Image (spheres, rainbow, N blue to C red):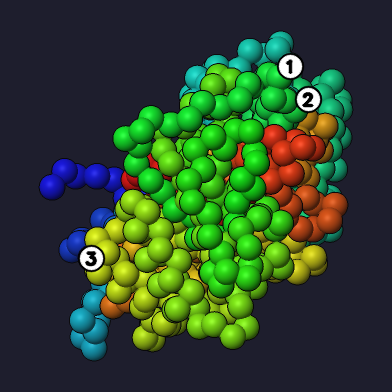
């Protein structure tokens, strides 16, 4: 088997759900007097840097980093007078000390240096002190954002002193909102004296951002400030999606029919708009029960079918080439309000629809439906999942199933937690798979954000942010594990992103960070954009077919 990388959650430095007990890793044997002396010297250096503020009028904050050899519980840091601000996957911890001289930490260091007394097996506080490998101040390079680094800004030396940069600055979440607002005012006063300006600011309950227009010299100064967490490029507007949505049949032409030997893929959803001029590859459409008809009034099925048929609809639109290589079939199983039939069991609906379309040559089926009331809790899977497992075995078919969408809602008063708690909230028990995504044999599909973009008119608004970065898990995707700890989702594909709107304190979909697909209202618009795991699953179905 080839060694393939797992999906990596992005770095989340603020407000993670912290470890309650030590994790993996073991503490190596230490010569306590030497180790204590080494750490004491490191503490002196940190305090010396703190007592030399970058500029008069901007109060320094005692924020530093510690590299450990094993995970240390947050309570252990707290008992030493330290607050965990962030962690990294190499066991680097960013800490804040409200005690400007680290008195309690130095006391514990002194006790540890005394070694083992006759009543002890280990020196005092060894679980904390011996776990520390190194301790030091944050550097300007630690504060450079990933986009800046990708652009070649590996250090402060890459900033031209006279050039003007427009960048977003995030402060560590230290103190209350009033305290953090005051800190921005301090920074602004200094920047103004040197010709720089703050264009916009956002001070939330746990997130503090401001956008600057400033010379490289001022940017270098900002990168030296203890209270600054990161300096990064503002999110970019997507200049492609909106023009593509305006394409007409004149621009695109009528799609050709697929080759005779094409594979078949079936959409089990809200029906299909059969008259769509780009849907030249539609085969059989049925309703289960038959009384539902086949037309897609809801619009969901046509969006899903567009991706199952064409894969990357955006690429097709950019190239103005819609040439289907598949035949697509449809089973309408929900009514125009998205509800199942009141009298018919869902298990019977699934069996009737899938068996009927398998007899038409379908080997690949997509199901982008789920029950938001049924979050998997490690118990027996429901009948919906069970019947999909049965059908996969009996008919030798592939079924792709979306994980279901997560609607994380911290409330308007905590709106910025959409950003500061991402991606941690994806691992909450409430974020687990919806029925029937827990099914064992079907391919469960999660969602990734293709891009991290903002609308073009949000260029000056620092409070409009994409929640996920490009190629990171979508903020609405759900997680496993499945039955008996099975790895779920099996695969991920692009399903879109969300924007955080600080004015409303909530997240919203926007075309700029959504996925392009077919519109069921084709007389008004051929293409539309949407976001959801419902659009990630058919992308996998397309590849399977």
The location of residue 71, given as percent across then percent down, is 35, 65
The residue under label 1 is 164
State whether residue 478 appears in this view: yes
CA neighbours of label 3 inside 10 A, class few (<14), some (14 to 19), many (20+): few
Q: Are marks 2 and 3 in contact (CB under 8 Å)?
A: no
Q: CA distance from mark 2 to mark 3?
A: 47 Å
Foreground mark, 1 or 3? Answer: 1
**Which label belongs to residue 220?**
none
Q: CA distance from mark 1 to mark 2?
A: 7 Å
**Vertical relation: 235 (above or below) 374:** above
The location of residue 325, given as percent across then percent down, is 41, 32
The residue under label 2 is 213
The residue closer to the viewer here, 106 or 422, is 422
Q: CA distance from mark 1 to mark 3?
A: 48 Å
Left of 282 or right of it: where is 526? right
Q: Residue at x 72, y 25 (%)?
A: 248
Q: Residue furthest bottom?
A: 119
Q: Are marks 1 and 2 in contact (CB under 8 Å)?
A: yes
Q: Are marks 1 and 3 in contact (CB under 8 Å)?
A: no
State whether residue 107 appears in this view: no
Q: Residue at x 74, y 16 (%)?
A: 164
The location of residue 311, given as percent across then percent down, is 47, 37
Toward which corner of the image does residue 114 lie, by quadrant?
bottom left
Mark 2 and mark 3 lie on one chain; the one further toward the N terminus is 3
The residue closer to the viewer here, 506 or 509, is 509
The residue under label 3 is 26
Foreground mark, 2 or 3? Answer: 2
CA neighbours of label 2 inside 10 A, class few (<14), some (14 to 19), many (20+): some
Left of 4 or right of it: where is 58? right
Q: Residue at x 45, y 78 (%)?
A: 348
């Amino acid at each position: 088997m080839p060694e393939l990388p797992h999906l990596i959650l992005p770095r989340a430095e603020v407000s993670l759900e912290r470890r309650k007990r030590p994790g993996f890793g073991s503490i190596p044997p230490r010569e306590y007097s030497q180790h204590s002396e080494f750490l004491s010297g490191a503490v002196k250096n940190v305090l010396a840097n703190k007592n030399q503020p970058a500029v008069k009028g901007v109060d320094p904050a005692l924020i530093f980093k510690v590299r450990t050899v094993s995970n240390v519980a947050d309570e252990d840091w707290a008992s030493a007078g330290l607050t965990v601000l962030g962690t990294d996957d190499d066991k680097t911890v960013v800490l804040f000390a409200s005690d400007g001289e680290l008195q309690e930490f130095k006391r514990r260091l002194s006790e540890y240096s005394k070694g083992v007394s006759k009543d002890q097996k280990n020196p005092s506080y060894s679980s904390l002190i011996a776990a520390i490998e190194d301790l030091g101040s944050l550097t300007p390079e630690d504060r450079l954002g990933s986009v800046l680094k990708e652009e070649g800004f590996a250090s402060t030396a890459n900033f031209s002193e006279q050039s003007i940069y427009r960048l977003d600055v995030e402060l560590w979440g230290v103190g209350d909102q009033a305290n953090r607002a005051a800190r921005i005012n301090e920074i602004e006063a200094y920047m103004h004296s040197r010709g720089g300006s703050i264009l916009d600011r956002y001070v939330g309950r746990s997130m503090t951002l401001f956008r600057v227009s400033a010379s490289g010299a001022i940017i270098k100064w900002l990168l030296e400030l203890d209270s600054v967490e990161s300096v990064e490029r503002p999110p970019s507007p997507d200049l492609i999606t909106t023009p593509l949505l305006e394409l007409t049949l004149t621009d695109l032409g009528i799609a050709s029919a697929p080759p005779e030997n094409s594979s078949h893929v079936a959409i089990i959803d809200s029906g299909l708009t059969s008259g769509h001029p780009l849907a030249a590859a539609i085969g059989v459409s049925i309703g289960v029960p038959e009384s539902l008809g086949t037309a897609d009034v809801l619009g969901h099925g046509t969006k899903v079918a567009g991706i199952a048929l064409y894969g990357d609809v955006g690429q097709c639109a950019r190239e103005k080439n819609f040439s289907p290589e598949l035949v697509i079939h449809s089973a309408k199983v929900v009514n125009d309000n998205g509800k199942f039939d009141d009298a018919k069991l869902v298990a019977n609906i699934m069996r009737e629809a899938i068996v009927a379309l398998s007899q038409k040559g379908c080997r690949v089926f997509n199901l982008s439906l789920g029950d938001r009331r049924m979050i998997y809790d490690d118990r027996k899977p429901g009948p919906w999942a069970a019947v999909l497992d049965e059908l996969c075995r009996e008919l030798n078919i592939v079924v792709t199933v979306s994980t279901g969408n997560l609607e994380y809602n911290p409330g308007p008063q905590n709106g910025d937690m959409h950003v500061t708690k991402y991606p941690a909230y994806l691992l909450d028990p409430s974020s687990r798979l919806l029925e029937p995504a827990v099914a064992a044999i079907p391919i469960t599909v999660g969602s990734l954000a293709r891009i991290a973009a903002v609308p073009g008119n949000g260029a000056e608004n620092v409070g409009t942010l994409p929640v996920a970065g490009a190629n990171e898990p979508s903020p609405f995707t759900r997680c496993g594990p499945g039955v008996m700890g099975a790895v779920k989702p099996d695969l991920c594909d692009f399903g879109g992103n969300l924007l955080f709107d600080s004015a409303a304190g909530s997240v919203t979909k926007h075309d700029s960070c959504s996925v392009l697909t077919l519109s069921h209202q084709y007389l008004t618009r051929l293409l539309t954009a949407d976001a959801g795991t419902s659009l990630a699953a058919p992308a996998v179905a397309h590849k399977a077919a």
